[in-house]
Every structure is written in structure tokens, then in C-alpha cells.
Amino acid sequence: MKTITLNNALLNLPTIISSVINNQEETVISTDDGAVIMIDQENWNGIIETLRLLKDKKSLQALLKGHKNRDENKENGKPIELVFDDI
């Protein structure tokens, strides 16, 4: 993650936005009062979806069970190729 000053961001905003979108890399814009992070919208949507799933107790339990089964080398469910055969 790269960090730039507010003045640099103001001078190069179109280039910075393009870089964030094309490289999927967050950029910190720092000021004397603090900092903000510029992130690609697709990544932001993924973060929001992850938070939504983690708030759902059933989803969280299924996720934890899946990780535990994977860590214990237990097969559980269908192979990924069958689950996502339409992609």
C-alpha cells in the first residue's frame, strides 16, 4: 500500500484513481489531521460482503466448519468444479 500526501493527491488525482483501479492496490492519502484510504470499488464491495457474511451466525459457523474440515483434511461436500460448473 502506498502513501501519498494530500497535495500530491490533488495534483495527480486522475492518475491515482486509475492506478488504484488497474492495480487493485489501496492508496493512503495522508494529511496533518489523519489519513484516508482510496480503494477500488470492486474490492470495497468484497469487503462489505465479507462483513455481511461474518455478521450472519449461520454463515460464520459454516465458514469455520469448512476451514476446520480443510485443516483436518476431511472431505465434505462437492468438489469446487461441481459447485461452480456454470462459471
Image (cartoon, rainbow, N blue to C red):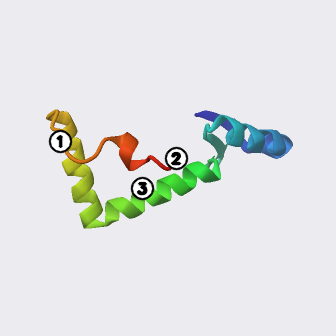
Q: Is residue 57 above or below residue 15?
A: below
Tell me the crowding category of disc 2: few under 14, some 14 to 19, or many 20 or more residues within 10 angstroms, Cα based: few
Which of the image's four quarters has the N terminus?
Answer: top right
9 horizontally vs 49: left or right: right
Pointer 3 or 1: first along the chain: 3
Displayed quadrant of residue 71: top left
Q: Nearer the viewer, residue 1 or 21?
A: 21
Where's residue 37, x and y in %? 60, 48
Q: Are marks 1 and 2 in contact (CB under 8 Å)?
A: no
**Residue type (three-letter) at the residue carrying disc 3:** Thr
Q: Is residue 63 above or below residue 5?
A: below
The residue at which mark 1 appears reads as: 69
Pointer 3 or 2: first along the chain: 3
Q: Is residue 33 visible?
A: no
Where's residue 24, x and y in %? 62, 38
Residue at image position (29%, 61%) is 59
Pointer 1 or 2: first along the chain: 1
The residue at which mark 2 appears reads as: 87
Where's residue 61, x and y in %? 21, 58
Residue at image position (65%, 47%) is 32
Say how many tags the image has. 3
Q: Nearer the viewer, residue 22 or 6?
A: 22
